[in-house]
Amino acid sequence: MALSLLTLAAAFTLCAEGPRTNCVVDGDTLWVNGEKVRLADINAPETDQAGCPAERALGEQAKRRLLVLVNAGPFALEAEGRATDRYGRALRVARRGGRSLGEQLVREGLAEPWRGRRSDWCVLLAAR
């Protein structure tokens, strides 16, 4: 399945154990039609492998907010740059009406722009 310029209007849930079709893993990763997708333009705090309780709490907020955003109506997944990451996930930017859903999470303080590497959220949150 090619996930570029694909408009989606599916019902998403939070990912659980077992087969994953349309669900949100965390603030920057989701499954779309059975394929794992990493939002290429942001980095969100971890949930399962968080480095501290503050990161886990913000990661949970980001995950739940992304769920709301993807369920708010059709959106497109667009390839920009590399097609996949080193883990084999499709790298895409999710957009609705030309606006990035990832950038919305950044504006709300739930993610940061992707800078080519993951930040230490525990350090970032301690500085706030």
Image (cartoon, grey):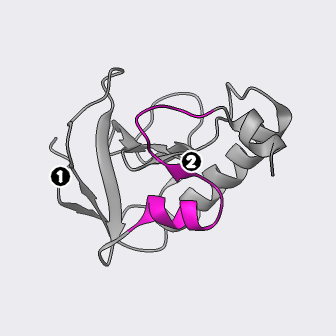
Is residue 60 magenta-colored? no
Q: Residue at x 66, y 60 (%)?
A: 109
Q: Position of residue 82 (x, y in %)?
A: 21, 36
- The quadrant holding residue 83 is top left
Residue kind at label 2, given as amino acid type? Gly
- Classed neighbour count for the residue bearing mark 2: other residues with Cα under 10 Å, few (<14), some (14–19), many (≥20): many
Q: Earlier in the sequence, mark 1 or mark 2?
A: 1
Q: What residue is shown with label 2?
A: 27
Q: Regarding mark 2 in the picture, which secondary structure is present there?
A: loop
Q: Residue at x 84, y 35 (%)?
A: 53
Image x and y of residue 65, in percent:
62, 61
Residue 105 sits inside the magenta stretch = yes
Report the side of 114 relative to 2 (left or right): right
> Image point 45% across, 44% down: which residue?
30
Q: Nearer the viewer, residue 2 or 15?
A: 2
Identify the mark at residue 94; answer none if there is no mark. none
Q: Is residue 52 above or below residue 87?
A: below
The residue type indicated by label 1 comes to: Ser
